Amino acid sequence: MARSLSRFLRDNAFIVAAVALPVAVAALFLVATVIPRWTVPPPSYDLVMRTTRPYDASRPGVVVDFAVRGGRVEATLRPPTPPNVYAEPSALLLFDHNTMRVREIPLELPARMEEGEPPRTIVVEALSGRRISPQAEAPDGYALQNRTGNSPGLVGELFGMGRYRQTAALVNDGRVVQLTLPAPFRDPYQSPVYHVGWVLEEGQP
């Protein structure tokens, strides 16, 4: 039996290689995606992100820019230019590292601003008691990425198993933590989310 199997493998070496090589490559990619999940710790910092709400023609909106200054998140508001142009309503999201969930941060912003009204800056009160860092990378090494496609890791990408869509993830040294956004931000064809800042513990720079 063993001799017959050896002869079969020798006589059909090309076929065996053609089958074994893709399996070996897939196994290597699978190991490369699984190992970081075992060795890289999960995120240890909350993340503040910005995005836009789904289209609503009844609301011309206000143009809002978010920035971190002095450890606080500030919103700078200005009227749309030109005034009749639709401005997508802005939103802030928070990734909670303890629950690994994303929730919307409540904002108290005016529904509209008059043409010619000067910009004004306000502090986001919902985050006023927390210290925020504008650094793109958290102290633990995680960073926000917007990823295209929804394949099951590198193996799915290798064999073309993905579907086009936008997904947000926290990435650190090979470990990928997918973020599930709350409604109404789950539509993959809506605007992606963008980094605003990491929530630091007290006493950290």
Image (spheres, grey):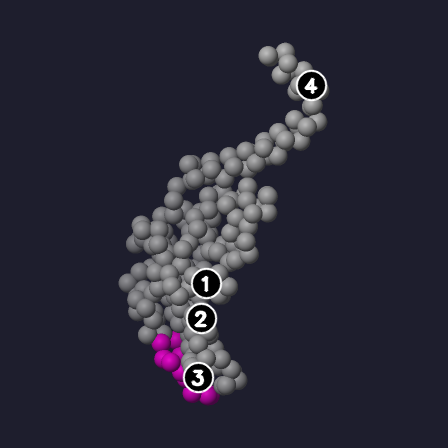
The residue under the point 32% across, 68% down is 106
Identify the mark at residue 10; answer none if there is no mark.
Answer: 4
Tag of residue 54:
2
Q: Indicate which disc residue 118 carries.
A: 3
Query: Which sits in the foreground, 200 or 63?
Result: 63
- At label 2, which amino acid type do we have? Pro
- Local packing at callout 3 (Cα closer than 10 Å; few below 14, some 14-19, many 20+) is few
Q: Is residue 120 magenta?
A: yes
Instruction: Please tell me whether mark 3 sits on a helix, a strand or a loop.
Output: loop
The residue at 38%/63% (across/down) is: 183
The region drawn magenta spans: 109-121
Mark 3 belongs to which amino acid?
Answer: Pro
Examine the rendering and report whether any part of residue 48 can be seen.
no
Nearer to us of marks 1 and 3 is 1
Residue 163 falls left or right of residue 104 = right
- Foreground mark, 3 or 4? 4
The residue labelled by disc 1 is 187
Question: Are the two marked residues, 2 and 1, in contact with CB atoms closer than 8 angstroms?
Answer: yes
Labels 3 & 2 near each other (Cβ < 8 A):
no
**Of residues 119 and 182, the one drawn nearer to the viewer in this rendering:** 182
Q: Residue at x 68, y 28 (%)?
A: 15
